[in-house]
């Protein structure tokens, strides 16, 4: 089976990758360490700083009125968050930001961050590019939800998550992140039961396989 069209664009990462921010974060930021599954920001938090992720991974989570969770995105090393509420008149976060692993961030005060931007044209351009990339990823995610069924969305997620530097053998790729079935459901917008059913079907068709309870994806010409 070929990779669903659009999967080369879709990514589970809503990344604001900006490695150029590393220097300024170390110069002016407050270093904070978070344990796995620690809440960093809540929907009601007044955000007055930009957070640069030096190491680790965080997720954006929204919760419906019925209590259902949806993972909006995952941010990794060299990404940052907090900029949008800092720049808008409403400074609340609107979503939960939770550490997925042990994570080190540098918290840069709003006024300090604005001064850094005013001093550095190259950093300004890097921030703009990161925001543009983020906007494109949001469009791809919307297209993914609108135009693909649940199986295609799951495959899009897996193909976007393969680590081409790690092959368990010549025919299979491992994933950069091993999602739980519950997490997959929260990302692609289906129940855990549906995820279990789709994974079982894809295993039967030898598109994916489970090795020690970890998903691996069949290597195809589209993934080369």
Image: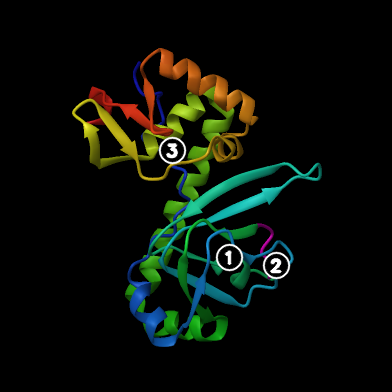
Instruction: Give the alpha-carbon distance from disc 1 to disc 3, as whole Å.
Output: 22 Å
Q: Is residue 93 one of those drawn in magenta?
A: yes
- Estimate how packed mark 1 is, as few (under 14), some (14 to 19) or many (20 or more) residues with alpha carbons within 10 Å: some
* Discs 2/1, front: 2
Do the numbered discs 2 and 3 sit on residues whose CB atoms are within 8 Å?
no
Looking at the image, which residue is at 50% across and 80% down? 108
* N-term mark: 1 or 3: 3
Which residue in the structure is indicated by mark 3? Answer: 10
Q: Give coordinates of residue 219: x percent, y percent.
A: 26, 26
Instruction: Give the alpha-carbon distance from disc 2 to disc 1, as whole Å.
Output: 10 Å
| Residue that lies at the very extreme toward the left in this rendered image | 170
**Magenta segment, which residues?**
90-95
- Estimate how packed mark 2 is, as few (under 14), some (14 to 19) or many (20 or more) residues with alpha carbons within 10 Å: some
| Residue that lies at the very extreme toward the front in this rendered image | 212
Q: Secondary structure at mark 3?
A: loop
Q: Secondary structure at mark 1?
A: helix
Looking at the image, which residue is at 68% across and 44% down? 69
Q: Give coordinates of residue 15: x percent, y percent.
A: 44, 55
Q: On the rendered structure, is 26 left or right of 47? A: left
- Estimate how packed mark 3 is, as few (under 14), some (14 to 19) or many (20 or more) residues with alpha carbons within 10 Å: many
Q: On the rendered structure, is 1 left or right of 28? A: left
Q: Can the viewer see residue 149?
A: no
Which residue in the structure is indicated by mark 1? Answer: 84
Instruction: Give the alpha-carbon distance from disc 2 to disc 3, as whole Å.
Output: 27 Å
């Amino acid at each position: 089976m070929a990779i669903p069209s659009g999967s080369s664009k879709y990514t589970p990462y809503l990344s604001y990758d900006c490695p150029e921010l590393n220097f300024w974060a170390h110069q002016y930021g407050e270093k904070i360490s978070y344990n796995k599954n620690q809440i960093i920001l809540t929907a009601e938090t007044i955000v007055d700083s930009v957070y640069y992720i030096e190491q680790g991974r965080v997720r954006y989570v929204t919760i419906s009125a019925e209590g259902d969770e949806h993972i909006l995105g995952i941010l990794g090393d060299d990404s940052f968050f907090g900029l949008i509420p800092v720049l808008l008149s409403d400074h609340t976060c609107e979503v939960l930001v939770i550490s997925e692993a042990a994570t080190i961030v540098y918290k840069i005060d709003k006024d300090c961050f604005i001064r850094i931007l005013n001093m550095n044209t190259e950093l300004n351009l890097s921030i703009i590019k990161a925001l543009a990339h983020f906007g494109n990823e949001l469009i791809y995610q919307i297209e993914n939800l609108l135009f693909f069924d649940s199986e295609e969305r799951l495959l899009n997620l897996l193909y976007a998550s393969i680590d081409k530097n790690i092959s368990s053998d010549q025919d299979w790729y491992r994933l950069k992140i091993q999602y739980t079935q519950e997490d997959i459901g929260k990302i692609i917008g289906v129940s855990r039961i549906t995820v279990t059913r789709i994974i079982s079907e894809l295993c039967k068709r030898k598109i994916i396989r489970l090795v020690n309870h970890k998903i691996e994806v069949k290597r195809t010409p589209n993934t080369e």
